[in-house]
Image: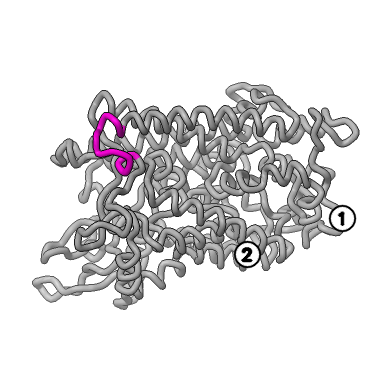
Amino acid sequence: MSKLSFKNLFKKQWSYVYAGILFAVAQIIYMLGIYFYKVSDGVSSEENTLMSISVTTDLGRMFRGLEVFMNNLFGMYSELYGNYGVDASGQIIPEGGVFTPGMGWPILGMIIGGWIVTRMENETRAWVHYSKKALIVSFIGGMFFSYGTRLAGGCTLTHLMGGIPYMGIRSFGSVIFMAIGGALGFLLMEKLGLANYFKHQETRAYVINNPDKGESATYKEGYNWKKNPVFWISLSFTIIFLFAALYGALSGADSMKHLSGGKLLAFGKSVADKSGFFVFMTLLSGIVAGIALSKSGYGTECSLVSLETAGDMTKADEKYAKMGVPKITRTLMRSYSPIIGVVTTWVIMLGFMLIAWTFFGISPKLGTGLKSGLTAGNFVGGLSLGFGAVTLIGCEIRSYMRIGMGYINTLVGFIGFAIGYLPYTLFSTEHKDFLDATVLFGTHRDGSPGLISDKRELYSLISDDLDIQKIVMFTWFLGMIFFLRYLLKKGSQNIGLKPVQLVHLNTEDIQEVIETEKKDGKIGGVDAPRPVPVSSYPENYNG
């Protein structure tokens, strides 16, 4: 077991509590960056609210930027993600459609953060091997996930890491159906014999040196990622995607700009479009978030799975062992570590938002617009998000850090992301009509209230009085603190350890403690996770 030290913080993986703290810091950096940018841009204090990290619309803009870049390169004018128009001089320029070309600095930052962690730990994850079946499922999962973001008005980050602390009604609806979709994805992976791949993070030290081959699904003796064409093809797609975005953001080329109201506007969210301060703060927030994600395997889909399965995995460990779920994953889920990390972030975010709202009058109120309310799209999209996140073995933000770390299944799944946007971009009118026809909370496009209410936050649904709204959010904040304490206590009981160990130890160290201290298959009065039986070993096991 690793001792707590600066060197180990640098070289080793972290606990989910540590990761949750750092991810909250990333959220606060982003909130401050957007807020002060809007102040400098002249936005009134009544309209300027705290905004959490958002990536899915930026991803769509980056896909449109890639499309425009490739069109310019090959003399084409495809309109998969957006449309073209003609300027006053007769030149064909991107104009309108679902997305115009733009940059997502937090996306780039999370990828960089993942890469930084590989340098800190001196280990990329390019060595990690996935079967052909697993790669196909990851590709399909990427499509389901990205399509779900369009219907649900955001990804799991938007809803679980932003909407829940903001008390957004749409996010509660989305998260419930994300949990259902995640359970369906888990069942599919088990039926396909892919449960061996359920891991929060891979490290060579744990996988290669582990005598239990049920923990080593991603290690294939003799595998050379440098000779795998799938790796290079999928990596090339990501490199071209990022190059196109950076070219548009940094070059100032007219061909990457877009028309709006007859005016030629800069590439979205470039320095010319926003400001150097905006770019710095949003990029920094992404880098910090990427480090938090990469240092633990922190993410959203695992947190919901842990809530759903912790009790059953504790009571029926043998059932999950026979499914092929690795011991370390069962320990992770039983301990509630993933949701502990998320709730840690919630508590810090809520504390920050309450201070900003109470003492500085900066509201956390959600924005306006069709997708800021609760529609049937949140239910259908939530199912798709949950299913896609589990089959991809990573939500959107985890995918960015995993790209930076070199995971082949995520590189393949990212191509699926690009395809998953197309049903929405090619049939956007039909999708928007569906969303508009099914508004439950929030407002329709014409401004009329939804079927139940025009409110978007639980605190505003309870009262229109600002003081009461703040009391409601403060009560929510206290509830999250008690929830975190409960999770730490119950999670540690489920694995036979102490809460302090969940706070400070990474998952591999926790598993090492269990293996070292268990007696007669038990630790702290509970069954230790059983080894995966040989009959459930991974497909690539060499015997």
* Picture coordinates of residue 35, whole percent (x, y): 25, 37
Q: Quadrant of the C terminus?
A: bottom right
Classify residue 436 as left or right of residue 399: left
Residue extent of the magenta highlight: 459-469
Note whether residue 277 is visible. Answer: no
Q: Tell me, yes or no, whether the two marked residues, 1 and 2, touch with CB atoms within 8 Å.
A: no
The amino acid type, in three-letter code, at marker 2 is Leu
Residue of label 2? 135
The amino acid type, in three-letter code, at marker 1 is Val
* Picture coordinates of residue 58, whole percent (x, y): 35, 55
Q: Residue at x 58, y 58 (%)?
A: 392
Dividing the picture into quadrants, the one containing residue 451 is bottom left
Residue of label 1? 534
Secondary structure state at the residue bearing disc 2: helix
Does label 1 or label 2 sit earlier along the sequence? Answer: 2
* Picture coordinates of residue 180, whole percent (x, y): 56, 57
Q: Residue at x 44, y 37 (%)?
A: 288
